[in-house]
């Protein structure tokens, strides 16, 4: 079921992702050098904390609303009602999360010390509401949304390179990194470029409650996921020095950049599989098998490439350009994260496989509760491991990477076990339906 439209979406997403990588390739080493390991660690600590506000604002709509829009996208009225219901719900959640984070910023000593960084980081919460990426994904037009983001990021990149000159510019770096999604949202709301703005639909309070109730399992899953992703950085910031946070953040940044190569496949295939799960179950299973082969293969390649070849870039860069060259200084800083990177790299492969078994199989076939339970256990497991391994350790960043790896392995095992059962049940349903059709034709 990989038709021309899906192939076009995937190709366009990878083209846009490549342009995004050019921006990231410049931004990441530049900020690491200009802000220093400590400043880079503070910025990433703030980003990780603010992600809780983003999670509350998103409330799982990036999964539930995408699926709902994908299944009704041929009905403009129904799609518009979903859009406004979700948008108003996110606005209310944004206000609540911003108020909570505002109180925490001036209540917690570790936050109050860098209050400016935390306050301006809340721009990320507003950006998640202003730019409805989930709506583009439901219509399988992510290449257009990504195009807007690339345009906005490229526009901000020049300002970032020109204005950020040292650790004293950390607040400015935060603002400029949050602005691209805000700018993309303003452009879309003013122009409707890429996908037309839905017609206005009045939403009742009861519909907002229903939307929140329907998305609750997805929100629970997102919160649980944060316990072994963003919360790892938060816990590390509580238990270790900023330098250790910076080393871990540098290694994790490379891992998540590599995972971005798998992102376009996931973004393109998830709404298609969700649609097929309703109209063509056999086609959905076939696409899931292809996703496992393709995403798993790319994940393996990225894991090996990151673990084996990135450490070679340091001596090569120094030999070619000298130790004072900006990129060389970045790789010299990353050299301290090399052992962390070795432990972290397999997360790319495990993450790619878990998304196939979890998001692209369990969720589309109505296994939200099991999906959520696994992630809750995984989140608690990561917090327990972090509390046990990190405090007092001189290699706190390394222990954090080992904790994430153990948790990811658990998730893959749990998802694979249930996904195999679900696929077997779906095949049995298909066989029974085929048998009824054949019996009806024979009679």
Image (cartoon, rainbow, N blue to C red):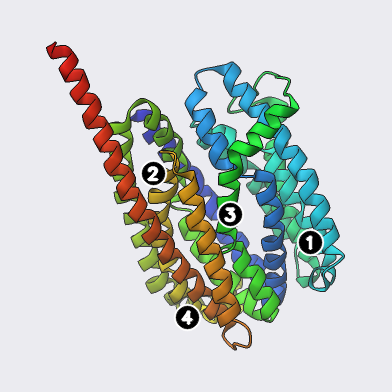
Q: Nearer the viewer, mark 4 or mark 2?
A: 2
Q: Residues within 10 Å of mark 4 (few under 14, many from 20)?
A: some
Q: Report the residue marked by disc 4.
A: 339
Which of the image's four quarters has the N terminus?
Answer: top left
Q: CA distance from mark 3 to mark 1?
A: 24 Å
Mark closest to the chain's N terminus, 3 or 4? 3
Q: Nearer the viewer, residue 248 or 187?
A: 248
The kind of secondary structure element at disc 1 is helix
Task: Write down the residue under mark 3.
Answer: 23
Looking at the image, which residue is at 48% across and 74% down? 341
* Count of picture labels: 4
Q: Is residue 114 left or right of residue 201?
A: right
Q: Residue furthest right?
A: 106
Q: Secondary structure at mark 4?
A: helix
**10 Å neighbourhood of mark 3: few (<14), some, or many (≥20)?**
some
Residue bearing the label numbered 2: 361
Q: Do the numbered discs 3 and 1 sit on residues whose CB atoms are within 8 Å?
A: no
Crowding around mark 1 (Cα neighbors within 10 Å: few <14, some 14 to 19, many 20+) is: many
Mark before the other along the chain sequence, 4 or 2: 4
First in residue order: circle 3 vs circle 2: 3
For image coordinates 54% across by 54% down, the residue present is 22
Distance (Cα) linking label 4 and label 2: 34 Å
Q: Are marks 3 and 2 in contact (CB under 8 Å)?
A: no
Residue closer to the observer: 86 or 178: 86
């Amino acid at each position: 079921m990989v038709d021309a439209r899906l192939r076009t979406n995937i190709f366009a997403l990878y083209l846009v992702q490549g342009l995004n990588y050019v921006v990231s390739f410049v931004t990441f080493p530049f900020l690491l050098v200009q802000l220093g390991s400590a400043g880079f660690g503070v910025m990433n600590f703030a980003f990780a904390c603010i992600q809780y506000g983003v999670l509350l604002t998103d409330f799982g709509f990036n999964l539930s609303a995408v699926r709902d829009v994908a299944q009704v996208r041929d009905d403009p009225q129904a799609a518009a009602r979903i859009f406004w219901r979700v948008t108003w719900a996110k606005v209310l959640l944004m206000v609540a999360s911003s108020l909570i984070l505002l109180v925490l910023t001036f209540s917690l000593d570790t936050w109050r010390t860098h209050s400016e960084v935390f306050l301006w980081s809340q721009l990320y919460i507003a950006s998640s509401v202003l730019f409805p990426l989930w709506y583009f994904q439901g219509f399988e037009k992510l290449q257009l949304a990504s195009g807007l983001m690339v345009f906005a990021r490229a526009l901000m990149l020049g300002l970032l390179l020109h204005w950020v000159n040292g650790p004293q510019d950390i607040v400015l770096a935060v603002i400029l990194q949050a602005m691209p999604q805000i700018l993309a949202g303003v452009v879309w709301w003013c122009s409707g470029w890429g996908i037309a703005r839905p017609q206005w639909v009045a939403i009742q309070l009861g519909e907002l409650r229903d939307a929140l109730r329907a998305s609750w399992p997805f929100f629970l899953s997102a919160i649980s996921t944060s316990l072994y992703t963003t919360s790892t950085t938060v816990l590390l910031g509580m238990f270790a020095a900023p330098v250790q946070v910076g080393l871990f953040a540098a290694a994790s940044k490379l891992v998540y950049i590599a995972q971005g190569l798998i992102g376009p496949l996931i973004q393109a295939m998830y709404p298609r599989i969700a649609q097929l799960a309703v109209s063509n179950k056999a086609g959905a299973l076939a696409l899931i098998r292809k996703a496992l082969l393709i995403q798993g293969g790319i994940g393996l390649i990225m894991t090996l490439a990151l673990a084996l070849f990135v450490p070679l870039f340091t001596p090569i860069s120094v030999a070619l350009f000298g130790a004072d060259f900006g990129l060389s200084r970045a790789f010299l800083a990353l050299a301290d994260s090399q052992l962390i990177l070795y432990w972290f790299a397999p997360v790319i492969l495990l993450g790619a496989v878990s998304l196939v078994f979890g998001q692209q199989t369990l969720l589309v076939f109505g296994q939200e509760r099991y999906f959520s339970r696994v992630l809750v256990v995984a989140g608690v497991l990561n917090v327990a491991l972090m509390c046990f391994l990190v405090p007092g350790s001189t290699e706190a960043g390394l222990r954090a990477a080992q904790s994430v790896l153990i948790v990811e392995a658990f998730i893959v095992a749990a998802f694979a076990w249930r996904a195999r059962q679900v696929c077997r049940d779906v095949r049995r349903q298909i066989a029974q339906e085929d048998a009824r059709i054949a019996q009806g034709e024979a009679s």
